Amino acid sequence: MNRSTRNYLALDLGASGGRAIVGRFDGERLTLVELHRFANGPVQLPRADGGTSLHWNILGLFAEIKEGLRRAAAAGNGPLTSLGIDTWGVDFGLLDGRGQLLGNPYHYRDSRTDGMMGAAFRRVPREEIFAATGIQFMQLNTLYQLLALAERQDPGLTAAATLLLTPDLLNYWLTGRALSERTIASTTQFLDPYRGQWATDLLARLGLPTHILPPIVEPGTVLGDLLPHVAAETGAQGVLVVAPGCHDTASAVAAVPAEGAHHAYLSSGTWSLLGVETQAPVINAASLAANVTNEGGVCGTVRLLKNITGLWIIQECRRAWAAAGRPLSWDQIVAEAGAAMPARAVIDVDAAEFAAPGDMPGRVRAFCVRTGQPVPDTVGALAAVVYESLALKYRSTLARIEGLTGRTAAPLHIVGGGSQNRLLNQLAADFTGRPVIAGPVEATAIGNILMQMLATGALASLAEGRDLVRRSFEVEAFEPRPRPDRDERLGRLEALT
């Protein structure tokens, strides 16, 4: 091992699992070593009224983070320089005046936000919420979660002294500092994208508390040392805690191995996040109509993007098939889908019926029945419908974003776990008509590490970091093939949305 090698720990938590990955930088290239992997997912709990609610096992996740830190400290490849945490957006924990957690944080798919968007619009018009925040309307946003607590006069909200989004809460338990990093704060739909501060006037008009909001820091901020008891428990001495792009998509976009400023990106996983980088928010009537979002990016950028339901539908199908006695690998599903193409039906992957866990194959078939289309009757036919519908959604979304910016975005960089799906990558190229560059798979961890390197002086700029990504990781190119049916299929999708 080169004596000058520096080690950085990325703690990357997604909606279905988390990893502890060490990045080793030898002065020329970055290599990754996964040290710990763990499951994550919703926990269903009974309520007093006989219903159920969905929560995160946040204490279990913190224990897994400490285990990852312990393994990294014991790996024997030199000391850790720093660590950074990134997670999914919108969810949060509430702390009382002593800094203690008030209950299990809710999962964004919990049904308590049903009807909350309408309740918000009755107090503040939709157009004014968008003008104040620039964020896409989704009922899972923190704004509607918080409103749901207020509408029900939740005692936890009454007792709360501090609101911390998921990565901010975990950072608080590591360092004792109650702060919010800007990229994760932007997912709430109550951050002013121009000032980078909380939109307190909006919250006050909605009757929501503002005293619980912590100070905001920029991505790449050094939060400080580990608390003594955490350092002693894990054996991680002298490790700095850095707030990278704490929203996992912000970290993933940071690692896009792009050259120049006119590319598009797609962070592909449970969600598909498709967009471009801009230097300023795009907030106008057209972006409101397109329901795009202006989330915070690293190094002063804005992520102008659209949240699209991604591989969630096929993930739920796979679970349903396994429960029905037919466990299938991802390779098997992709092979059967490829053999069944072209699909005979199109679905709107963002339709409300696909949002919650459940019998997803049945929901896809019911959608086809409701819209008068051929019903897929095999695993391959159904998977083909989902994959082709996703690629068509990429096409329509990219066209809208290009219309907002007035420029063509090419190539399309696909990063994240979904970039391993070569069938979907090729479909994305075919339907968007753009060259696709797929990889790196571990973009979120890499972007997390790049921001740690910027914070500790190993890199001077984001451009330098992306050059390091190009030197260090392989990618695969996909050229668009002719699809004579593209416009007809796109028209069918547009008619459904």
Image (cartoon, rainbow, N blue to C red):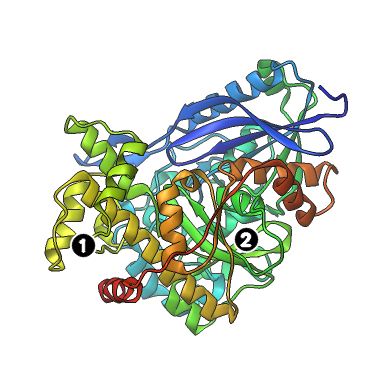
Indicate left or right for 358 with 446 as reference. left
Residue 404 in the image: above or below residue 150 = below
Measuring 72% from the left and 40% from the top, which residue is drawn there?
Answer: 242
Measuring 34% from the left and 62% from the top, which residue is drawn there?
Answer: 116
SS state under label 1: loop
Measuring 69% from the left and 44% from the top, which residue is drawn there?
Answer: 243
Marks 1 and 2: CB-CB under 8 Å? Answer: no
Residue 211 seen by the camera: no
Indicate the amino acid at tag 1: Arg
Indicate the amino acid at tag 2: Gly
Find residue 432 and report its horizontal and vertical position in percent: 45, 68
Which is in the foreground here, disc 1 or disc 2? 1
Quadrant into which the N terminus falls: top right
Indicate left or right for 431 with 162 as reference. left
Quadrant into which the C terminus falls: bottom left
N-term-proximal mark, 1 vs 2:
2
Residue 413 is labelled as: none
Callout 1 crowding tier (Cα within 10 Å): few <14, some 14–19, many ≥20: some
Please name whichever residue, 495 or 473, is drawn nearer the observer in this view of the structure: 473
Indicate left or right for 419 with 250 as reference. left
Specify the quadrant of the image occupied by residue 11: top right
Find residue 316 and report its horizontal and vertical position in percent: 29, 43
Which residue was labeled with disc 1? 344
Which residue was labeled with disc 2? 296
SS state under label 2: strand
Residue 84 seen by the camera: yes
Specify the quadrant of the image occupied by residue 409: bottom right
In whole angstroms, how far apart are the C-alphas of marks 1 and 2? Answer: 39 Å
Find residue 286 and report its horizontal and vertical position in percent: 48, 82
